[in-house]
Amino acid sequence: MSVTTKDVSYIAELAKLRFTDDEMLTMTAELNNILHYIDKLNELDTEGVVPLSSIHAPVNVLREDVEHTSLSSAEVLQNAPDRQDRFFKVPKVIG
């Protein structure tokens, strides 16, 4: 399978790109090189190879759900740069 300049032009149109004639020839050659490289993968013998969804063994990495006591409002607000009553005070960001 090879890519023609017509194919590159169509792809460029879909991607809203504009290429000069020289760039169009360069892109055509580069896409053909990529497809040629990918086509080499078809030469591999994959008979008997089990498909993988991940290279890592599926392991549950979740921690135990252990209950902890919460911080009080005073402890949380201790490091706040600015506060109002029991809330963090931040600069207005919406006009």
Image (spheres, rainbow, N blue to C red):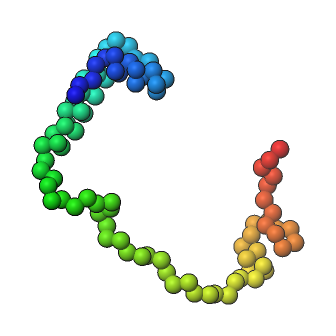
Where is residue 33 shown, x and y percent of the image?
22, 30
Residue 39: image x %, image y %? 19, 37
Position of residue 2 relative to residue 58, above or below, is above
Q: Quadrant of residue 9?
A: top left
In the image: residue 26, left or right of residue 85: left
| Residue 20 appears left or right of 50 | right
Task: List the single residue furthest toward the front.
Answer: 48
> Can the viewer see residue 60 in this picture?
yes
Does residue 24 show up? no
Q: Which image quadrant: the N terminus?
A: top left
| Residue 69 location (% of width, % of height) | 68, 87
Q: Tell me residue 95's x, y (percent).
A: 83, 44
User: Which quadrant would residue 40 be assigned to in this image?
Assistant: top left
Give above or below for 76 relative to 84: below
Tally of marks: 0
Could you say which is closer to the camera, residue 77 or residue 18? 18
In terms of depth relative to the viewer, which is nearer, 86 or 14? 14
Please name the residue shown 78% across and 79% down the image.
Answer: 73
Q: Residue at x 15, y 59 (%)?
A: 48
